[in-house]
Image (cartoon, rainbow, N blue to C red):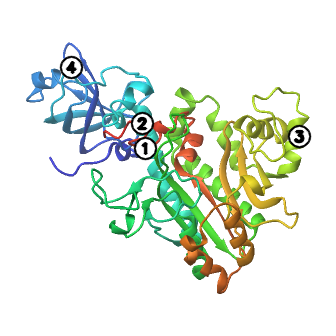
């Protein structure tokens, strides 16, 4: 059989009639007295195509013995379905068995726990929940490129292997070709000058620093790629490998940065509502009641702006016993962020101008000497979802700040060069792709929105 039509396209047809061919995997088999019903799914949409198989089909007895998960090709006539809840059904003329599946197939039940499905990550895309997650993830990735492309941003591929740690956290995966059993040594220490790159290197934690260099040549750029953190964390919000979207704009300040972040976030929400409605409907019904209403609300919301100092004062006066009391000079916790969005503002808010001592070296220092031009975008239910800043474009202040924070200037000489020749104000932010998908789906564990999660002790798939 040739000329496969995707089930999504079959179910979207304006009228029945005609012969078509569909291929996919069987979700259920119901054997009746003189007829068998197959629920066929090919991953193109949430809905299944009901296939009606009658004894006149040559291999009818074999079809009746098919198990859940079997791959088949069906040629038949598309007819209006008499049953409620489905527009069409296919009446089989010919059915070919492509790949058998038996009772040992792990996805026999209709519902499995997410914890169990993580142990069979190679099979979980065949479930309704994860089919919906990955369809949305794919559509959203394409929307990200459209958003920036429509605005004239240059797409930059920044290095995955790097010798610098953008965040200064030191939680990088080491990249080396040295013999780990007996590495070369110099004065008792491993001699990385003998390594492949002639120095210590690791997997990137961010493409921001390299992105800044391109912004100072092309004005507006963005990166979208994998990043890595060797953080030994087993929380629902952390994985060792994840994807980041990081735009950078020249001739831009913190307010312009926040405006782009707001436009971007609302664009992605609208895209999901317009193009992934079926999958969002599934999440709204089975994962997060009220999801659709929340997304529709935030897609048209006006984002407030609040200074960090005001935010702390509001939190101190709040009639709530926080687990972590709010104090000026400390970072905001998720409970603080949610209180600000849900109880103070009643919607999304940008918190700006954070204390300099809790922020990275590259953030522009404000004139008060206490704060930097940083911003976090907070949304109800989640808290912080986007973080960004205006970058320090003044060479002398940047050098001084690097020394204060223990960042070796000689290791970032190329970054400092960008402040020596043609420096200008510039700003950018980072959005964790998986965090965005969690927000749009209501899924509560980051391991359930990335195809093959990398966490401490787990890299088997």
Task: Give me the residue at 41% from left, 55% from top.
Answer: 174
Question: Pointers 1 and 3 in contact (CB under 8 A)?
Answer: no
> The C terminus lies in which quarter of the figure?
top left
Residue 321: image tag: none
- Describe the element under mark 2 as helix, strand or loop: helix
Residue 94 horizontal/vertical position (percent): 14, 36
Relative vertical location of residue 422 with respect to residue 110 in this rendering, above or below: below
Q: Earlier in the sequence, mark 3 or mark 2?
A: 2
Cβ–Cβ below 8 Å for labels 2 and 1?
yes
Mark with earlier residue (3, 4):
4
Residue located 13% across and 23% down the image: 55
Say whether residue 198 is visible. Answer: yes
Residue that mark 3 sits on = 314
Mark 4 lies on residue? 103
For residue 134, which numbered disc appears in the image? 1
Local packing at callout 1 (Cα closer than 10 Å; few below 14, some 14-19, many 20+) is some
The outermost residue toward the top is 33
Look at 54% across and 29% down and name the residue there.
287
Q: Position of residue 207 (x, y in %)?
A: 53, 64
- Residue 302 visible in the snapshot: no
Disc 3 versus disc 2: distance between alpha carbons?
A: 40 Å
Mark 3 and mark 4: span between their CA atoms?
59 Å
Residue furthest toward the bottom? Answer: 421
How far apart are the alpha carbons under marks 1 and 3?
Answer: 39 Å
Question: In the figure, residue 387 lies in which quadrant?
Answer: bottom right
Residue carrying label 2: 130
Cα separation, mark 4 vs mark 1, equals 26 Å
């Amino acid at each position: 059989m040739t000329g496969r039509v995707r089930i999504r396209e079959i179910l979207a047809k304006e009228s029945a009639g005609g012969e078509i061919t569909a291929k996919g995997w069987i979700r259920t088999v119901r054997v009746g007295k003189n007829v068998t019903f197959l629920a066929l799914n090919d991953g193109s949409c949430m809905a299944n195509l009901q296939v009606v198989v009658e004894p006149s089909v040559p291999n009818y007895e074999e079809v009746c013995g098919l198990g859940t998960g079997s791959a088949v090709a069906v040629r038949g006539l598309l007819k209006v379905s008499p049953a409620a809840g489905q527009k069409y059904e296919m009446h089989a003329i010919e059915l070919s068995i492509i790949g058998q599946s038996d009772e040992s197939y792990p996805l026999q039940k209709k519902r499995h726990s997410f914890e169990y499905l993580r142990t069979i990550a190679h099979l979980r895309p065949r479930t309704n929940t994860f089919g919906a997650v990955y369809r949305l993830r794919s559509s959203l990735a394409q929307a990200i490129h459209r958003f920036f492309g429509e605005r004239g941003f240059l797409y930059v591929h920044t290095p995955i292997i790097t010798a610098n740690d953008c965040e200064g956290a030191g939680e990088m995966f080491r990249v080396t070709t040295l013999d780990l059993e007996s590495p070369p040594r110099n004065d008792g220490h491993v001699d990385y000058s003998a390594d492949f790159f002639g120095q210590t290197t690791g997997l990137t934690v961010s493409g921001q620093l390299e992105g800044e260099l391109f912004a100072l040549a092309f004005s507006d750029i963005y990166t979208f790629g994998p990043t890595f953190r060797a953080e030994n964390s087993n929380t629902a919000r952390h994985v060792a490998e994840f994807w980041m979207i990081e735009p950078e704009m020249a001739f831009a300040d913190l307010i312009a940065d926040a405006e782009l972040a707001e436009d971007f976030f609302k664009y992605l929400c609208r895209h999901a509502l317009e193009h992934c409605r079926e999958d969002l409907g599934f999440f709204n019904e089975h994962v997060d009641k009220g999801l659709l209403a929340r997304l529709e609300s935030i897609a048209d919301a006006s984002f407030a702006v609040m200074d960090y100092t005001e935010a702390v004062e509001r939190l101190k006066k709040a009639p709530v016993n926080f687990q972590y009391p709010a104090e000026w000079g400390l970072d905001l916790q998720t409970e603080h962020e949610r209180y600000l969005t849900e109880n103070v503002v009643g919607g999304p808010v940008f918190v700006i101008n954070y204390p300099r001592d809790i922020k990275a070296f590259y953030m522009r220092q404000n004139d008060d000497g206490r704060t930097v031009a940083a911003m976090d975008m907070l949304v109800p239910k989640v808290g912080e979802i986007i973080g960004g800043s205006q970058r320090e474009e003044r060479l002398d202040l940047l050098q001084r700040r690097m020394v204060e924070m223990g960042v070796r200037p000689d290791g970032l000489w190329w970054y400092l060069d960008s402040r020596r020749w043609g420096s200008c104000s510039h700003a950018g932010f980072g959005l964790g792709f998986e965090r965005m998908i969690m927000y749009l789906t209501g899924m509560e564990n980051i391991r359930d929105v990335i195809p093959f999660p990398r966490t401490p002790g787990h890299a088997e798939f």
